[in-house]
Amino acid sequence: MSSLFPPSSPAPAGRRSKTLATWIALVGGALGLHRFYLHGRRDAWGWLHLPPSALGLYGVRRALELGQDDALSWALIPLLGLVLAQAMLTAVVYGLTPDERWNARYNAGGRPSRSGWAAVLGVVLALFLGAGVLMATLAFSGQRYFEWQAQQGRRLSR
């Protein structure tokens, strides 16, 4: 795995704000923007956020155009839900990281970053959004799975 994804390059020079990273993960985490903020544009893990997000958005578009019975859309939509839930979890982790640990990792040798209530507010919002998105994703996937099972059962009983 290390040859495919080399360790992320150190954070680009400059101060990295924990509060800003939390809010970037909250707003643009599904696109990997928080990874690019912390590790630069060459971060492979940041680029890996794009395909599942794009596929999930394509699934949403198909569902809007073709209706809820489109099998491909209900297979793709959970990808978006999982990426969004992961982004919210990342925002929570960033926001709850102690300032000393954050500064040792992202601001070593530079001016320390101090977080305040804005980071806490980002964490609270990420918890609400992340829990809601994860529950909706599980409910949607479960509903579609059981509908498919019922349809298969009807086919077998004919």
Image (cartoon, rainbow, N blue to C red):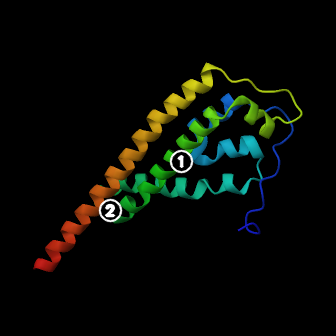
**How many neighbours does mark 1 have within 10 angstroms: few (below 14), some (14-19), or many (20 or more)?**
many
> In the image, 5: left or right of 145?
right
Quadrant of the rendered image containing residue 23: top right
> In the image, 144: left or right of 127?
left
Picture quarter with the C terminus: bottom left
- Image depth: mark 1 or mark 2 in front: 1
The x and y percentages for residue 41 are 76, 49
* Residue ID at (61%, 20%): 117
Q: Which mark is residue 70?
A: 2
User: Mark 1 highlights which residue?
Assistant: 86
**Residue 64 visible somewhere in the drawing:** no
- The amino acid type, in three-letter code, at marker 1 is Gln
Quadrant of the rendered image containing residue 65: bottom left
| Alpha carbons under labels 1 and 2: distance apart | 25 Å
* Residue ID at (67%, 35%): 21
Task: Say if 20 sits above or below 146 in the image.
Answer: above
